Image: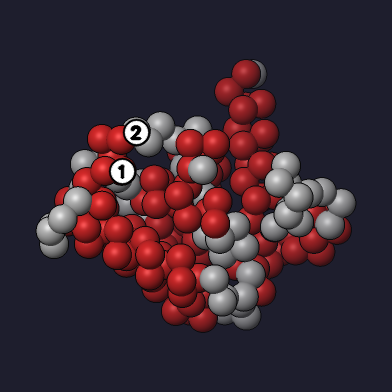
Amino acid sequence: MANLLSLKLGWEEVVPLFAEGDGPAQSLREKLNLALTDLAVTEHFEDYDSVEKLETAVASLAAANAATTMVKNWTPTTVSKVLHRRRPHIVPLNDSYVRAFYCVKTTESKLLRETLWRDLQRNKEWMSELASTAWTADGRKLTLLRLADILIWMDMRSRSRN
């Protein structure tokens, strides 16, 4: 599913997560599984009334991001694309377009979430109205996080053409 978001995961990146043992790859898989479970019952990203409460809610996402440091070809970008497909209401995409839009570095996942959360707070009304008119290809209501990613992607692509 993550490959639908321009990720190029192959067997070389995925199989080690399911191998026997207790190394970094298996730890990452455990953290991804925990994040999927924890994040299933969270509010929507933009519905938290403070960035501190949001960060508490996404602690398992932060842990999965941290677990990538010792696993070949896994980064916070990879984690975000894997988890966003299953938890689009709470996991923001952390890719080069979004980071460039908000002027944050690859390693600044927390700053990216905070900046995006503040932006959604300022623009929640009109974005909610727009999101309510659209559905994903698989029939789900478009989340504000997914809408934000689409808008950012379109803006950054148009900038690169000029």
Residue found at x 12% / y 58%: 21
Q: Secondary structure at mark 1?
A: helix
Q: Is the C-beta separation of discs 2 and 1 under 8 Å?
A: yes
Q: Residue 14 — which label?
A: 1
Task: Name the foreground residue: 120 vs 29.
Answer: 29
- Looking at the image, is 152 positioned above or below residue 86? above
Q: Position of residue 88 (x, y in %)?
A: 60, 57
From where the camera sits, is residue 137 visible? yes
Task: Name the foreground residue: 133 vs 82.
Answer: 82
65 left or right of 101?
A: left
Label 2 – label 1 distance at C-alpha:
6 Å
Q: Position of residue 10 (x, y in %)?
A: 34, 33
From where the camera sits, is residue 92 visible? no
Q: Secondary structure at mark 2?
A: loop
At label 1, which amino acid type do we have?
Answer: Val
The residue where tag 2 is placed is 10
Q: Residue furthest front?
A: 20
